[in-house]
Image (cartoon, rainbow, N blue to C red):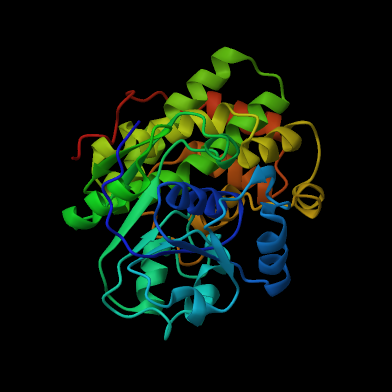
Amino acid sequence: MVERKSDLKKVLVIGDGGWGTTLAMVLSNNGIPTTLWSAFPEQAKAMTETRENKTYLPGIELPKGLKIIADPFRAAAKAELVISVVPTQFLRSVANRFEDAIPGDVPIVSATKGIEIESFSTPTQILLDELGERPYGVLSGPTHAEEVAQKKPASILAASKDAKLAKTVQRAFSCDYLRVYTGDDPLGAEYAAALKNVIAIAAGISDGLELGDNAKSALLTRGMVEMARFGIQHGAKRDTFFGLAGIGDLVTTCCSRHSRNRLVGERIGKGETLEQILADMRMVAEGVWTTKALFGPEADMRDVSMPIAEQVHAILFEGKDPYLGVTDLMTRAPAAEMEGLLGS
């Protein structure tokens, strides 16, 4: 049993989706006073009364000590650490609600995976825009909420340029089923987390087209190169992409039955339209909007070669036939395997 060494007196988790609820459960089970903020008063009331998040984690009992509150000021009162778990495209408006509720010296850690379409900002960049400069970090890795909530073993990365904050997060979340590593490249962790969802859609398309194991393995490998190439060009560390936040999360997201992004791709490969798929999805598939952001008007691609992402964008938003996308990938000009990965 891992001994808890955190002396945090209160943590606020913003966002009552599956992952936000799970992280709040881990903290509460570790003996840390924790409040989970919900955007919807009726949802907060229902979770408080039933001790269950029936929408996102049905059948999982919430810890008795976990508080669920809808009012930002009540939720944030006396919090010493904030964990943000809000989908990227809604994050700015939610963060704005906490502008006056969270003091400027309270650290904030993002557990969101995506890139904002309108600004091409990462989640921590959005949070700092709305809440002001403060210590910040990123919590990311191969951790499906469904499994962590059931206390199945997993590992995750707590990345921050503030070593003390990274250690604080590590101590707060470490337990006998969640092993937390620290890192100093939050930007790389965010880019890896966002981009792996795009590759997961491609992996799902491969599954839907029944292209086989060889094709999917090649797709994951080349997708990893694209992710790292993008990160290096944007100031991230190469090594981050070959750790938990990069290849670890990529494998899980591309192969798991829990992966929403992989499922979107699989359904596309089987002939459904994106509109049909999104219309009946309860949870957010961040990879769809990250793909749109990558090729949007505010995108900063800096001449980065991302052929897989380009084909995913063409298939999702330009109506390109998935088979033609595969053909175009296979018939590109010959290249060296690790081209563009010489940075650090």
Q: State the residue in front, 160 or 41.
A: 41
The percent position of residue 41, horizontal first and vertical second, equals 68, 74
Give the residue furthest to the front: 64
The percent position of residue 189, horizontal first and vertical second, equals 34, 47
Give the quadrant of residue 260.
top right
Residue 234 in view of the camera: no
Instruction: Residue at 52% x, 68% y: name it.
Output: 91
The N terminus, quarter of image: top left
Up-down relation of residue 21 to residue 1 (above or below): below
The percent position of residue 152, horizontal first and vertical second, equals 51, 29
Left or right position of 7 against 335: left
Q: State the residue in front, 318 or 45.
A: 45
Left or right position of 255 against 174: right
Task: Report the label total.
Answer: 0
Q: State the residue in front, 241 or 314.
A: 241
Left or right position of 58 against 148: right
Residue 7 in view of the camera: yes
Q: State the residue in front, 195 or 101.
A: 101
Instruction: Residue at 29% x, 52% y: name it.
Output: 186
Give the residue furthest to the bottom: 100
The C terminus, quarter of image: top left
Up-down relation of residue 301 to residue 245 (above or below): below
Up-down relation of residue 254 to residue 197 (above or below): above
The percent position of residue 35, horizontal first and vertical second, equals 49, 65
